[in-house]
Image (spheres, rainbow, N blue to C red):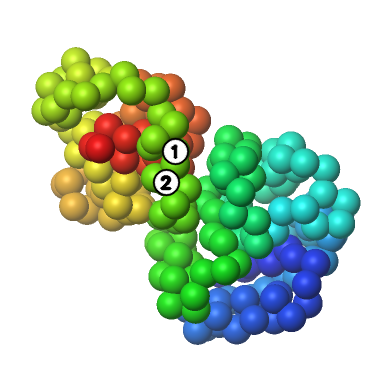
Amino acid sequence: MKILIGDDHLLFREGLRRLLEQLQGEASFVEAGTFDEVLDQCRAGSTFDIILMDLHMPNWPGFDGLREIQALQPGVPVVVISASEALGDIRGALDHGATGYIPKSSSVKVMMGALNLVFSGGIYLPPGALTASMEAAPRRRTVDMSDRSAGYGLTQRQREVLECLRLGKSNKQIAYELGLSEGTVKIHVTAIFKSLGVKNRTQAVIAAAAMSA
């Protein structure tokens, strides 16, 4: 596994790398201290397995910078690890394609659990952010999800896949548990995104939590 760590604080990069080494002993690491350095590493020709980065680094262009990274490393998960716990930053990152958001204030235990979840293909969000997103969500439903028309038009199988997404399971895990091929799971995930009007797994998780509230 090849991991890119982008953060302007050397001590934090070193600490994060040590945590990651406990989870991914065979991983190799590339570090960057500014947003421009992150872009340079993404352009260098190597494909990363995951990118972990802070917001508001030197040269940070705003949330569109996340789109730049995704364009250079298509399909690679970009997880934000930031000192900011502002809901606006969390939403901005998710809306621009981040596949998770881990506050730097998290305890070592929480950080390890969050990173484990991310490496397994899941999505980590701060509990407070998830609650706030649910409260801010339009109250379009106060009904039982077993009603197909109430569950945004999702089929029973799609609701099962959505529940797996909510639990942070990867496509491979979902396929195994539901007895499906990974290709079929991807088709269901695409249909779920379309039905919920979301663009990524993170937004689908927020929608799923709100639906079950």
Horizontal placement of 149 versus 152: left or right? Answer: left
Residue 86 versus residue 22: which sits nearer the camera?
86
| Residue hosting label 1 | 133
Quarter of image, res 134: top left
In the image, is residue 167 above or below residue 20?
A: above
The amino acid type, in three-letter code, at marker 1 is Ser
**In the picture shown, does residue 94 fall above or below 59?**
above
Query: Which residue is nearer to you in this view: 18 or 143?
Result: 143
The x, y position of residue 150, in whole percent, is: 20, 19
Three-letter amino acid code of the residue under disc 2: Leu
Q: Is residue 121 above or below residue 108?
A: above
Measure how far apart labels 1 and 2 are at the Cα level. Answer: 5 Å
Q: Is residue 165 left or right of residue 79?
A: left
Residue drawn at (60%, 84%) of the image: 18
Which of the numbered marks, if any, corresponds to residue 130?
2
* Residue beneath the point at 19% across and 15% down: 149
Identify the image quadrant of residue 37.
Answer: bottom right
